[in-house]
Each structure stands twice: as structure tokens, then as C-alpha cells.
Amino acid sequence: MKSASVTLLLFLAGMILLPSCKKPSDANDENEHEAINKLELTFRQANQPDRVFIAEDPDGDGGLPPTRIDTIRLSVGQNYSVSFRALNIVSGVERDITPTIQAQANAHEIFYVVTGLGLQVVKLDTDSRGYPLGILSAWTTPSNMGTGSVLIKLMHKTGIKGPNDPPNIGHSDLELPMRIEIF
């Protein structure tokens, strides 16, 4: 009877302690996320200097409002090659998360939802199945001046990504509105 009690006590202790064990973090785990607290959009045109527009939120989602959200200012009737760069900055150390997004392309998609302008955005890069990714895109501005906005959404879509998904499929790793001025 005494050995049964000891066995039961050891079993119960094990059941209490086992849940406190944590699986070690795996940098290649597509469900492992770091906060994106800086975004850079780089606009390129032939024979022109690059134009970089930035949004920063040092404390991440929630808490204090972003400290910087640039207005994207583009010229009328122009074509731009645009690259998306997501960063995590902690204690002054900057880590580019974009290669991780690219490595996990089958589970991610970046959306550019334009409001108030005739701006056209086309994603140029794809995942291994040929589904859109959006780290690289082409932006064509309208022939008239105006203001509007673009909602930039990085969607995490493990196991559910399709070739023509709307921007509300999956869960959002980043959702950031930026003002646009066409002059």
C-alpha cells in the first residue's frame, strides 16, 4: 500500500511539473514571432535616388502610439519599384525580420489596401507555390494629384494561404495605415 501511495504521489508531482516545462524557442518555427516595431518602404525609380518611408513604434503593438509614421509622397503618373522591410529593435539592436518572412513565404502575405486614390499596387514576388508574397511590389500612381492612404497588412496564414486571398484571411502580424500624397 505504501509503494502505491509513493507511486501516486510521484505521478501527481510529475503531472504538476510537466506543464511548466517549456519547449525551447526555434528560430525556424513559423509560429514564433518577434514584434515588428519598425517598417521601411523603399521606393526606387531609374536614375533617381531611393525614397524611404518609415513607421516606428518602439514599444510595439499597444502601449504608446507610434513615434513616427511618414507620409508617403509620390509624383503623379509614375512607376515605382517598392521593397518592404520589417524590423525588430530591442535595446538599440536592430534585427531584420524580412528574411524570416521570406523563408516562411508559404505562410505569409503582405497586403497594400489603398483608399481614396487610383494608386495601383502589384505584388512581384511569390512563395514556392507561386502564391503572392508582397515584399517586392510595383506601384503606379494616378495621373491626378490627391491624398489617400494605404493599409499595410502582413498576414500570417499557416496552412490556409491561397492564390487570391483577400486581406482578412489569417491573422495579422502587422497592420499599419500610412497617409499618401500624390503631387
Image (spheres, rainbow, N blue to C red):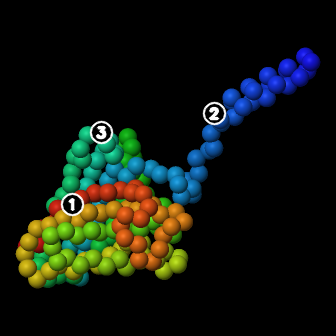
Give whichever of discs 3 and 2 has the lower sequence position. Answer: 2
Q: In this view, does 117 lie to the left or right of 84?
A: left
Q: Which amino acid does label 3 sit on?
A: Gly
Mark 3–mark 2 Cα distance, whole angstroms, equals 29 Å
What residue would you read off at disc 1? 178
Q: Please, is residue 113 above or below residue 59 in the view?
A: below
* Tag of residue 51: none
* Labels 1 and 2: the sequence-earlier one: 2
Q: Give how far across and how far down residue 104 sits, in percent.
A: 51, 65
**Are the residues at dot 3 and dot 2 in contact (C-beta closer than 8 Å)?**
no
Q: Quadrant of residue 159?
A: bottom right
Q: Where is residue 23 in the image (x, y as percent from the top left)?
A: 63, 44
* Residue at the image point whose x is 57% and y is 57% from the top: 28
Q: What residue type is labelled 1?
A: Met
Mark 3 and mark 1 lie on one chain; the one further toward the N terminus is: 3
Element at badge 1?
A: strand
Q: Mark 3 highlights which residue?
A: 63
- Residue 62 visible somewhere in the drawing: yes
Label 2: how many residues lie within 10 Å, few (<14), some (14-19) or many (20+)?
few
Residue labelled with disc 2: 20
